[in-house]
Structure formats: C-alpha cells, structure tokens
Image: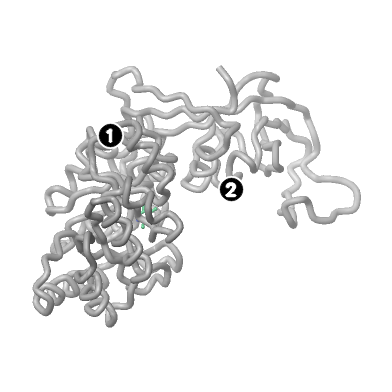
Amino acid sequence: MSAPRLEIRLDRIHHNAKTLVDRLALLGVGVVGVTKAALGLPEIARTLISAGVTGIGDSRIENIETMRRAGLPCDFTLIRSPMISQAERVVAHADVSHNTEIDVVERLSACAQAQGRTHGVLLMVELGDLRDGILPAQLPEFVGQVLRLPNIAFRGIGTNLACQSGVAPDQENMDVLSSLADSLEATLGVDVETVSGGNSANLGWALSTADPGRVNALRLGEAILLGRDPLHRKAIEGLHTNAFTLVAEVIECKRKPTKPWGELGQTAFGPVKARTDRGVISQAILALGRQDIDPDGLEAPDGMEVLGASSDHLVLDAGPSSPAIGSEVMLQLNYSALLRAMTSPFVTRVISEGDGKAEDRGLASGVAT
Ligand SMILES: *Cc1c(COP(=O)(O)O)cnc(C)c1O
C-alpha cells in the first residue's frame, strides 16, 4: 500500500458518534456532526448520519458541495459566516448558515430570491471568546432586520467558545444564551427553534449539567472523530481515540548522536528546540513532513519519539528499535495534524469498516491513552 496514508476506521467513528448522540439525547440535545477536519469526506458524513446526527456542519462551502454531490440525505449548515463572494453557492448548497453581518444576510436574501429558495440563518452570539458573534445587546435589533428580509428563515441562535481565547463553556454563559432565546421570543414574538451551544469543548458542561436550559444542539467534530475533549485534550470515556491512524514509511535509520555539531542558526521553520543529549540513538526518518502534518500533533508508537520535522522528513528517536528501511510506522494524530493530513495531496486515505469484531483497543476509560 502507498505511504503516507491515513487509515480511517468508520466503525470507530460510528461508535463515537452514536455514543455522543445517545448521551446527549437524554438532555434533549441534538448533534450536528462537523466534518471540516475530514474535508467533508462523504463516507464519514454518511457514517455520522447513520449514527443519528440531526445534520452535518462544515466551515467550507466546497466540502458541503462535495457531500451534496454524493447525495447525502440531510440538512447542511455552513458553520462559518459566508463570504459575500460565495453567497450564491451557499444558498444553492447549504440549508442554513451561521451569520453575524447584516450585509451578508442581505446578499443571501437576494440570492435566495433569485434562486427561488429559502435560506436558513442561525445568528452567532459573542459570549466572550472574541471570535465571531453579534454582541448580545445588538442581537434583538439584528433579528428584527433578519425577519424583514425575504426568502430568509430565522432558525435560531448559537455561540462558539474555546476556539480563539479558550473561554470555557459553563452554566453561566450557557444560561446567558438560553435567556437571550427567551427574551427574543418574548419581545419579537419569533420562534427560536435552534439554540446551538457550541463545539466539542461544550461536552464537559453538557454531560454534567443538571439544566441544559434552551440549548438543544451541539456541533461536534473533534469529539466524534478523535474521541477527545478539546478543552483539556482528555480522552472521553467510552470513545475510540484511534479512528484515524497515519502510516508513514522509513527511509533512513542510523545510529547518530543526539547533539548536532557545527555553528547553529535557525532552520527554514524558525528556531530549533534544543535537544537533550542522550548520546548516540537509533534515529529513524519517515517520508512525511510539515506539508503533510503538524509534527507537534503526532504521537509516535511506544518507545519512539518525534524529534522534529522539516518539509519532507520526520525525524524519530526510534528507541531500542531500528526499523528496517521500507518498513512502516504508525502514528496517532491530534486535531491539527489530522486537519493537515486530510488536506495534503500526498497523504492517501484508506477507509475501512474494521473487522466487525468487538475491539476494545483504543476505547478510553476516562484516562488519556
Ligand atoms: C469547527 C467548529 C465546530 C466543531 O468544533 P470541534 O471542536 O471539532 O467539535 C463547531 N462550531 C464551529 C463554528 C466550528 O467552526
């Protein structure tokens, strides 16, 4: 098989999605499966739909178009504010989009009229993370403007935390979102059908709260795909953390000193982390680089350690082993490494359903694996 390749286990993704869908259903919270880290791969989206998500969210209209072309039967939400330059495509292919600027919603309205469609709008509210969002004080007026636009359906409100500033979702900010929904209904007489509380970072709150309030949707990517809670990067109990494995090929393995020699400057990628001197080690090089992955987001197999990477070489301390030239090494990925591997044209994808046997490897039990 060709290398580097990303091995994708749909059975594990299905297990993760179904487990979260079931746990959140007890609270009346539906799951929008977020596919952006998987480049909108239709096989993954289909797996999420079969696990019971209420719809698919992606930040790129290109990915949504790919999934549409694959004929997937679900609602698609563009979870980043549309670019005005893409408004026509957004109306043509997404059912709903996240919005924070009236200029954009006006353009969506014009395109929707031209196409004879209705486009759903979910308004994002700023609750402190300082990424996208309408300030709460300006929300009622904004909703009023949206309601006057033809061919636009106001679907509800949402927020996004823990992405820009690391603000944690908690009872206090979720209660603010709920009361905004209540007050919009009371003052404007609108139906706030969807209250979308946030991303995978909301799970800690959602799975422990006694009162989800009006929050009835979460948008989950990382938790489903990697089985981790991004707030603390801890494995989520009962989920697989190894639905994705990156396989790369060894192109050099030699005993070399850990300390470089000669006068030291910066590399093409900036200053170098000083290496601890471990004497002579078994140093292996994989044909994989920064074009394909984020080296800081890779976990080498037991006994091996990632020392660094250039564009095309990943350098490992191979520990007590000396892997044969041409042999393969399997690595686990974090979100950032996965995102890059999925978007690298050099990394092929091998999608499988697994062997169907009950397999416990990689099933977290509350401890990071
Ligand atoms: C990426 C994204 C998500 C999903 O985030 P995860 O941490 O992967 O669950 C949810 N909402 C928005 C707006 C996003 O951009």
> Which quadrant, please, contains the C terminus?
top left
- From the viewer's side, name the closer residue of 352 and 326: 352
Instruction: Tell whether circle 1 marks a residue whose Cβ is less than 8 angstroms from ligand 1.
Output: no
Res 266 → quadrant: bottom right
Q: Amino acid at mark 2?
A: Asp
Task: Choose between 319 and 145: the one closer to the eye.
Answer: 145
Residue 313, percent from left and from top: 70, 36
**Which label number is shown at residue 298?**
none
- Dot 2 corresponds to which residue? 296
Position of 335 compared to 263: left or right? left
Query: At 55% across and 17% down in the image, what residue appears?
Result: 1
Q: Position of residue 23 (x, y in %)?
A: 18, 46
Label 1 residue SS:
loop
Residue type, numbered disc 1: Leu
Q: Nearer the viewer, mark 2 or mark 1?
A: 1
Measuring 61% from the left and 44% from the top, which residue is drawn there?
A: 295
Q: Which residue is mark 1?
A: 72
Q: Quadrant of residue 206?
A: bottom left
